[in-house]
């Protein structure tokens, strides 16, 4: 399992449109290369998406194979397109940051383990040879915030726990940003600043259909 976060950072609405469009591109390109990309969570913008958390995986693929593919996305991505929001606007280049998210340890979250309550249960599925016969799915309750996060996409309880902690961290940070800063555009900035312009982009797409040009 590899997790990628796509973020518009503090960019304008066009960058948020780019996040939404690039999510579709990522899912499509991963499928073409035999990988499964699942959008786990999104934070809506106005318009588009402020951020998206994407899971990459494949049952028979080694972690390093998936990580190697993910590295081709890590960095700044440029979308070149006349603004769909501001006709006649001079700027045509919009940027999105893609970073790998490492599942945290509880101590990294700055919360007490006593504030967490875990439930385990058997993940539902379509059946067949890979149906879960153990309680691999988890539900994480964070008492102070009232958050409850369910994860059942992984076949092992350990990985579902790691994914639940990752989602808790991102959600708590988003809440903190919303309280500390005015404006919805900044609430999912986290620690991500979209850097790199022009030649610094690791990938480049153009037009409303997001055609890859580099």
Image (cartoon, rainbow, N blue to C red):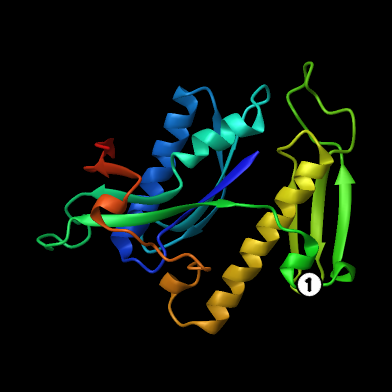
In which quadrant is the C terminus drawn? top left
Which residue is most to the top?
129
Nearer to us in this view, 108 or 206: 108
The picture places residue 32, in percent across and down from the top left corner, at 45, 23
Nearer to us in this view, 94 or 193: 193
The picture places residue 123, in percent across and down from the top left corner, at 80, 36
Q: How many marks?
A: 1
In which quadrant is the N terminus drawn? top right
Mark 1 falls on what kind of element?
loop
Nearer to us in this view, 71 or 180: 71
- Dot 1 crowding, Cα within 10 Å, few <14, some 14–19, many 20+: few
Tell me what residue is drawn at x 24 percent, y 36 percent. 213
Q: Quadrant of residue 50?
A: bottom left
Name the side, left or right, on which 201 lies relative to 158: left
Q: Quadrant of residue 111?
A: bottom right
The residue wearing badge 1 is 111
Name the side, left or right, on which 22 lies relative to 106: left
Q: Quadrant of residue 60?
A: top right
The picture places residue 172, in percent across and down from the top left corner, at 65, 69
Tell me what residue is drawn at x 89 percent, y 28 percent. 133
Nearer to us in this view, 193 or 35: 193
């Amino acid at each position: 399992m590899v997790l990628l976060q796509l973020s518009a950072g503090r960019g304008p609405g066009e960058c948020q449109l780019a996040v939404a469009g690039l999510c579709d591109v990522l899912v499509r390109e991963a499928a073409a290369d035999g990988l499964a990309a699942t959008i786990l969570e999104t934070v809506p913008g106005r318009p588009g998406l402020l951020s998206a958390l994407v899971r990459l995986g494949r049952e028979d693929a080694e972690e390093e194979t998936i990580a190697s593919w993910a590295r081709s996305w890590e960095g700044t991505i440029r979308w070149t397109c006349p603004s769909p929001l501001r006709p006649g606007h001079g700027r045509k280049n919009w940027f999105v940051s893609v970073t790998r998210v490492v599942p945290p340890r509880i101590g990294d979250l700055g919360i007490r383990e006593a504030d967490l309550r875990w439930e385990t249960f058997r993940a539902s599925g379509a059946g067949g040879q890979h149906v879960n016969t153990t309680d691999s799915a988890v539900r994480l309750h964070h008492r102070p915030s009232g958050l409850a996060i369910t994860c059942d996409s992984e076949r092992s309880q350990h990985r579902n726990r790691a994914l639940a902690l990752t989602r808790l961290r991102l959600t708590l940070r988003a809440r903190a940003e919303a309280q500390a800063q005015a404006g919805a555009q900044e609430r999912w900035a986290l620690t991500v600043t979209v850097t790199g312009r022009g030649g610094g982009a690791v990938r480049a797409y153009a037009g409303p259909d997001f055609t890859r040009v580099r």
